Image (spheres, helix red, strand yellow):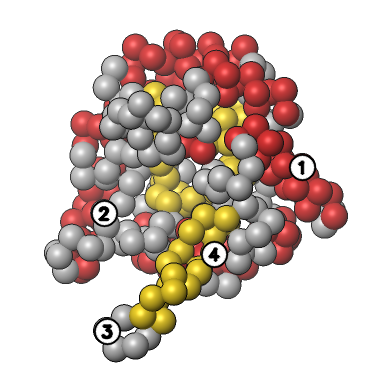
Amino acid sequence: MRFSVFTASTPDWTPDVVARKLAEQGWDGVEWRVVDQQESETPGFWSGNRATWPLTGLEEAVPEIRRITQEAGLGFSGLGGYAGAWLHDDVDRVLAATAALGAGQVRVTMPRTDTGVPYPEVFARTRTDLEWVVSRAGEHGVKALVELHHETITPSASAARRLLEGLDPRHVGVIHDLGNLVIEGRENHRASFELLGEYLAHVHVKNARWVADGERSADGSLTWRHEWAPLRDGQADVGRYLTDLRDHGYDGWVTIEDFSTDLPLEERLRDDLAYLRALVGAHV
């Protein structure tokens, strides 16, 4: 397995600093965040993130992205795009950039389930969109990735397999995301890998936990909320997960997106890599 970092989780650093820090710490690669984000005076994961490349003008940024990545000796685990499958112009832009960079694969986001539109209708429309996406990915010689993500139409491996069934796995695949599955969609991991088969294309690792917020609903039920947690402290068993991946035969990229804030950023990433390597080493 090779380990990389998704730059959504490195908001304080500019791309040059990200590449240098990851190389110094011994990471194998980087997954650049690509989106036209909301600006903020204070860097954050989702707005004002300094390690994000804008979608607008992405074509012009390709040489700089390539230079920064290659000069640091890092590989591309893919691009972390936010283009919705229904936004065809945006999707084609990130597919073209992925091809130009030699990054191989890029995330294309799925619709949410809280829009008020019935699920079967959203599912059917998205399947049509994905058929177009896969055709364009084939033209560009890259792969579009569908992430298992809570509150979207693909929170689980079962839902993603149903959506992708029959599409060319050379040009579309699934990101299996350990932390997201704590929130919604968890199935037995080994069974999920087997179910996805050739569609298992990429892995994201973070951790999460559910906490009681001390309040009760109108009917008296205790209410809970989810929050991101350090890899060692969340409800997902990272060591068991990596073992299951290895036993399944997965030997691709494992990309960290650690949104916990218990440790400062540099220390957090250094500890994440040490932890992952220790877990992999313990199960060889």
Q: Distance from label 4 to label 3 (Cα)?
A: 24 Å
> Along the polypeptide, which appears first: circle 3 or circle 1?
3
> Percent position (x, y) of residue 174?
46, 52
Residue topped by disc 3: 218
Residue matched to label 2: 111
Which residue is labeled 1 in the image? 274
Tell me which numbered mark, 4 or 2, is placed earlier along the sequence.
Answer: 2
- The amino acid on which the numbered mark 4 sits, given as a three-letter code, is Arg
Badges 3 and 1: C-beta atoms under 8 Å apart?
Answer: no
Residue displayed at 28% across by 48% down: 130
Element type where label 4 sits in the image: strand
Identity of the amino acid at label 3? Ala
Q: CA distance from mark 2 to mark 3?
A: 30 Å
Tag in front: 1 or 2: 1
Q: Quadrant of residue 3?
A: top right
Disc 4 vs disc 2: Cβ atoms closer than 8 Å? Answer: no
Q: Is residue 250 above or below residue 257?
A: below
Residue designated by label 4: 209
What is the three-letter code of the residue carrying label 1?
A: Ala
How crowded pointer 2 is (Cα within 10 Å; few <14, some 14-19, many 20+) is rated as some
Up-down relation of residue 102 to residue 230 (above or below):
above
Q: Position of residue 210 (x, y in %)?
A: 50, 68
Q: Earlier in the sequence, mark 4 or mark 1?
A: 4
Residue closer to the observer: 225 or 147: 225
Q: From the viewer's perspective, is 244 left or right of 53?
A: right
Q: Which is nearer the N-term, disc 4 or disc 3?
A: 4
